[in-house]
Image: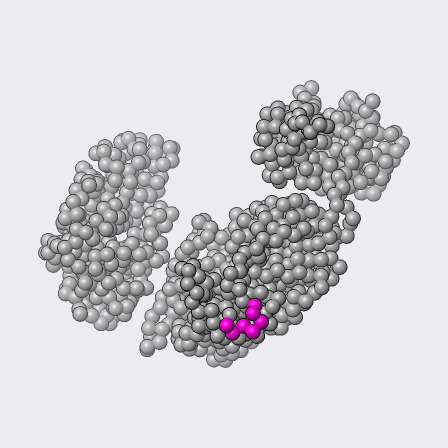
Amino acid sequence: MAKIGVFTCWCGENIARHVDCDAVSNAVAKLPGVHCSLNYKYMCSEPGQNMIADKIKELGLTGVVVASCSPHMHLKTFRKTAENAGLNPYLVEMANIREQCSWVHSDREIATAKAIELIGMAVEKVRRNHALEPIKVPVTKRALVIGAGVAGIQAALDVAAGGVEVVVVEKEPSVGGKMAGLSETFPTLDCSQCILTPRMVEVGQHPNIKLMTYCEVEKVEGFVGNFKVTIRKKARYVDITKCTGCGACWNACPMKGKIDNAFDFNLGFGHDKKLGKRSAIYVPFPQAVPARPTVDAENCLRLKSMKNGKELCGVCQKQCAANAINFHDQDELIEIEVGAIVVATGYQLYSIGKEQENPNIQGYAEYGYGKYKDVVDSLQFERIISASGPTGGEPLRPSDGRVPEKIVFIQCVGSRDNAKGITYCSKICCMYTAKHTMLYKHKVHDGEAHVFYMDIRSGGKKYDEFVRRAIEQDGAIYHRGRVSKIEEQTVDGVKKLMVYGADTLSGKPVVVEADMVVLACAMTPTTGAPQLAQKLSVGYDEYGFLSESHPKLRPVETNAAGVFVCGACQGPKDIPETVAQASAAAGKVLIMLSQPNLTREPEIARVDERLCASCGACVKACPFQAITKEEIRDRNGNLVKTTSRVNPGLCMGCGTCVAVCPSKSVDLVGFTDDQIYAQVESLAD
Amino acid sequence: MNIGYYPGCALHGSSDDYETSVRACLKALGVQLDELQDWICCGATAAHSINKKLATALPARNLGIAQKMNLDRLFAPCPMCSMELKKASDELQNDEVRAEMEKIVETPLSGSVDVLNLIQVFQAVGYDVIAEKATRKLEEFKPACYYGCLLTRPPKTLKFDDFEHPTSMDELLAKLGASPVEWNCKTVCCGGGLTLCDADGVAQMSHRILKNALDSGANCVVVACPMCQVNLDMKQADAKKLGLAADVPIFYLTDLVGMALGLKPSQLDVHRHFTQTKLSK
């Protein structure tokens, strides 16, 4: 005999304003199976919870319905209350009479009637609930961090400091990411490399960290606490355990000074063709970790000749005293087991040229990027003014190596431009553009720095002061308006860029005869981020930024249990915010891996193996690859039948299999078809 | 190949030299032009700034005539006309608009007529086919290909070439032996509608375009729009007052293609241009 308690919450005025809670309690008390029906102003408060606990103990309730807000908000709260009072938590249900009733209706009478019906449905469901036990799964105490920019480095160091083993996978030959190439950082102007390189070294040396550079994630299987990850170790042609990093090879390479360096964003200089160029066997930058070279197969004369069955060049191999170069190196697949994964794949700049990866996003042909050598993007400019950059920090323009007398900085190139397909603000450009004007002015005292902006967004500690400093102390000239076109013209034998813009504050067109233009392009997720997200079953938005589980309360978790995000792969953000988020992700990983077992919700799919016809529809439909076909054999090993079977560690309880099963032999525990039909039927009375 | 032909007001008026050139050039390519019977104004700038319904109805009627004549492709040499026709054709894809327009113009409308500009007609013939039919190379020509504002804009309607940095005209002329120059003003406004009301403004705008063409090493400018031709050719004297260094011959795209196909300049009405058309070496 069911003894159900119904507890109706006023939620202050949120529910009580439009729902007559006394009338609801009285009406619900008459429903079959309802043993007690009470209401209270804040059911989630301590007295409210005590009221529920007391009634469970006093009356020996067999089920509880709390009529209040969304189960997303407080189901866990009330289940905990019931558990503490001795009732199985899975015998608690919620009726959402706030978001789905009082908040969306203004007629008190109708809203009250609807609240009664919603509670009636929950009562019908809870009458058919069964006591369930959470599923316990063992945990592999090892974490994987994907990406080794500042986010990945921070997350890895924090997890490792917590005593947990970490594998760091980085697709480039060195750790460091974008930050390793930056000049100085806002708002303190401390040198980016000076603060990052010690941490890069630490990642390379930490006893708990296994660093895998020039590697990519190939496949992810398994589930929270028990992931099996296949990693592709790309052919590097150098055995980094033998190599001493002496540099004999890259100095001898005949391609030295001829190949674009991706670390310098392929910058090239007209006055010195070798500037910024590398050799075919190379270390991307002197502070690289590991400080070991990689052979670029596309440009290596030996490797190219081997495709035609010849063996040309090979100078580096002859130079190598450690015998570390192996031209027959091949990609290797390595399988590792981890309990948690942190994604920190970072960002890249929206490519301003015409061809865009995302067909909905258009380029800016009118700015002449790619056509005019002195139109550069902001990351290229970082390299130009960085002490570790190709020019040693001297601000030289690419076309002819002259020191620019006038630079125009254009903000919001791509960002906040619906017509070009990107609606979001990239958040960091206002700040780094102010920084660029300062750094330039500190190096060229009589230079002019013009900025075209839409709004200045400088929220953050000491951020607005920083922008004001650029304007007031360093004399950057800010124009509020957009640039419509950039043209190259030769004035007195020198190439100039005519920048046609508008100053909307004075209402006048502005033409600046500049020597160089820097475009602050939108931040977009790195190439391949959506593909990686698919491997991890993590959601992503239309631009490819990974989705966090809750924008406020679960900012580093994702909807795939055991997978965490941090840094710019989740959305545009600056270094302080990235580091904070990376530490948060590391904290979450440590919390998860500190337990001997993980508990998972038992509300998952179950196949009735007697009925299953083994058609495989559910196997194909399952988005989590949680269902497999299994054979049932008798004790003599003879095949009795084949059936679908759900892996309880993988099933997320989405119910897709239930919907596709033609023989109705799959059901969702705690959400059975019977329960749903009973709920619907309760409405017919 | 035969296609529908909508000359529009310019080609039957101030720019009848363009019509001579278009007809002669396309005839040499074997393209037969079926002129719409009883065509009316496309609406141009005047209609769409005053009355949206009228701006759709005027070109819609012309599309209706094309449909009645069983023409599935309609060529308008003036980019303003082709843009207005294309825009109306897009709007007719909406059933409600189509029903209303059918009532206004008293003609059944299917919205299935394909509207082409001059370059698209050449693309339909095929650049390779044109190059094969050419009897002489345009070696002495170093044209600055000028697309103006309306050949590529608005991009949502026209979906033609890169609207900020188009190259389709350059590609065609390069195939015919000319050496198109890289320059800045491919899609910069010539002054267009200001011809009558702000002559000084137009002079400044065309001066900028012509000067940049010369500075970039061009010895002529090639256009595919009657309005651009008027501003750059007829009014070049005003630009000269602002200090333009030399005469800049202005050709229609059909003039150059026609000459490549072996036509004499006089057959293309080139002698009727205002600025002299002798190329500087």
Q: Locate the N terminus of chain A and report the quarter of the image it occupies.
A: top right
Q: Which residue is found at the position 79% from the left and 31% from the top?
A: A131
Magenta stretch contains residue A322? yes
Q: Nearer the viewer, residue A645 or A179?
A: A645
Q: In this picture, which residue range is highlighted in magenta?
A: A318-324
**Residue B38, percent across and down?**
19, 37
Task: Decide if residue A331 is on the left or right side of residue A68.
Answer: left
Q: Is A321 located above or below residue A624 in the figure?
A: below
Please say if A213 is above or below A648.
Answer: below
- The residue that appears at 18% across and 57% down in the rendered structure is B256
- Residue nearest the viewer, comparing A675 with A189: A675
Place residue A75 in its image quadrant: top right
Q: Residue furthest top?
A: A685
* Secondary structure that dominates the magenta span: loop
Q: Examine the rendering and report whether any part of residue A168 can be seen.
A: yes
Q: Residue furthest bottom?
A: A445
Horizontal placement of A58 versus A375: left or right? right
Q: Which corner quadrant holds the C terminus of chain A?
A: top right
* Residue B32, horizontal then vertical, whole percent: 17, 42
Measured as percent of width and height from the top left, residue A25 is found at 78, 29
| Residue lying at the far right of the rendered structure | A58
Q: For this rendering, which residue is in front, A486 or A116?
A: A486
Name the residue rendered at 82%, 38% in the picture: A83
